[in-house]
DNA sequence: GTTGAGCGTT
């Protein structure tokens, strides 16, 4: 048991990970570090990115060293507005937290009645969904776990809507031979609109306020 | 350029 005091890298069981949801897509780990570091000793912050696009998925993982600091961060930073979005901080289902954490969702399976009519997956996703959206066979050819496809499916929903609206809008413009004068003015350089105004944003320095006051 | 329920890399 005694490893001469050398425990190696910080194990997960020795740290407490927090899940930060509702994070803006452009929020980086550095931004979160500036907030969470004030509440305690942050070991590391990881922001999972999409394997295809590489963009942030909208959530991050903040790993604290002590539970009391992590709990304080949840109580203080939970609901705080970051980058224009109110983030949601809660314990992640990982490490020692997964055994005790009841926030967000029930991890235990005791709430699963067997006698009652079980409710299987009401929504069944076929690969046709991906093909319908125009995805290549390269992606569906790979064997991903159900969890992975589930996540990808949820993410693709927003993209699907965006592409659909964009396509419909374009088709409408195309079909419409006669363009309304408003459209012409909007796309005409003569009509200076605020949309093309110089986005000179004053670099407002961040005010280092102690979000987590010392006990 | 967009979107918004959730659980992750070495």
Image: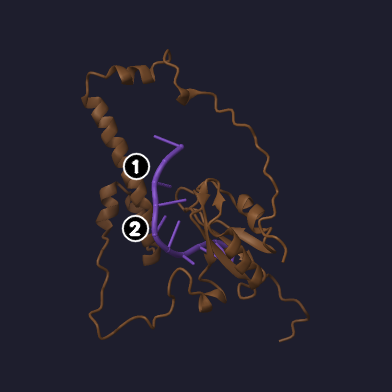
The residue pinned by badge 2 equals: A141
Label 1 neighbourhood size at 10 Å, few (<14), some (14-19), many (20+)? few
Q: Residue at x 39, y 83 (%)?
A: A110
| On screen, residue A121 above or below A59 | below
Q: In which quarter of the image is residue A179?
A: top left
Residue A147 appears left or right of A29: left
Q: What element carries label 2?
A: helix
Q: Which chain did the renderer colour purple?
A: B
Chain assignment, label 2: A
Q: Which residue is drawn at 67% across and 59% down?
A: A212
x and y percent of residue A147 in the render? 39, 65
Label 2 neighbourhood size at 10 Å, few (<14), some (14-19), many (20+)? few
Q: Residue at x 64, y 54 (%)?
A: A35
Total numbered labels placed on residues in the image: 2
x and y percent of residue A22 in the render? 48, 54
Between B10 and A44, the one lying in front of the other is A44
Quarter placement of the N terminus of chain A: bottom right
| On screen, residue A199 above or below A189 | below
Counting residues from the start of the chain, the first of labels 1 and 2 encountered is 2
Q: Which chain did the renderer colour brown?
A: A
Residue B9 appears left or right of A212: left
Q: In which quarter of the image is residue A201?
A: top right
User: Which tag is nearer the camera, tag 1 or tag 2?
Assistant: 1
Between A78 and A53, the one lying in front of the other is A78
Q: Do the residues labelled 1 and 2 touch (CB within 8 Å)?
A: no
Q: Is mark 1 on a helix, strand or loop?
A: helix
Q: What numbered label is drawn on residue A37?
A: none
x and y percent of residue A193 in the render? 44, 21
| On screen, residue A6 above or below A176 | below
Q: What numbered label is drawn on residue A162?
A: 1
Residue furthest out toward the top: A190
């Amino acid at each position: 048991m005694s490893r001469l005091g050398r425990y190696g890298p910080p194990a997960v069981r020795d740290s407490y990970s927090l899940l930060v949801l509702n994070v803006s897509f452009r929020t980086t780990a550095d931004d979160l570090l500036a907030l969470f570091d004030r509440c305690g000793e942050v070991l590391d912050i990881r922001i999972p990115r999409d394997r295809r696009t590489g963009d942030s998925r909208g959530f991050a993982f903040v790993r604290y060293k002590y539970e009391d600091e992590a709990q304080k961060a949840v109580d203080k930073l939970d609901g705080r507005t970051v980058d224009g979005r109110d983030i949601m901080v809660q314990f992640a289902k990982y490490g020692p937290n997964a055994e005790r954490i009841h926030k967000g969702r029930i991890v235990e399976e005791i709430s699963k009645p067997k006698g009652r009519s079980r409710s299987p997956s009401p929504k069944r996703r076929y690969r046709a969904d991906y093909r319908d959206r125009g995805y290549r066979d390269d992606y569906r050819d790979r064997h991903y776990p159900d969890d992975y496809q589930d996540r990808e499916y949820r993410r693709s929903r927003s993209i699907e809507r965006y592409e659909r609206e964009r396509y419909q809008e374009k088709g409408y413009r195309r079909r419409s031979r006669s363009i309304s004068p408003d459209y012409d003015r909007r796309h005409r350089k003569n009509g200076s609109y605020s949309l093309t105004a110089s986005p000179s944003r004053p670099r407002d320095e961040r005010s280092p306020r102690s979000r987590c006051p010392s006990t």
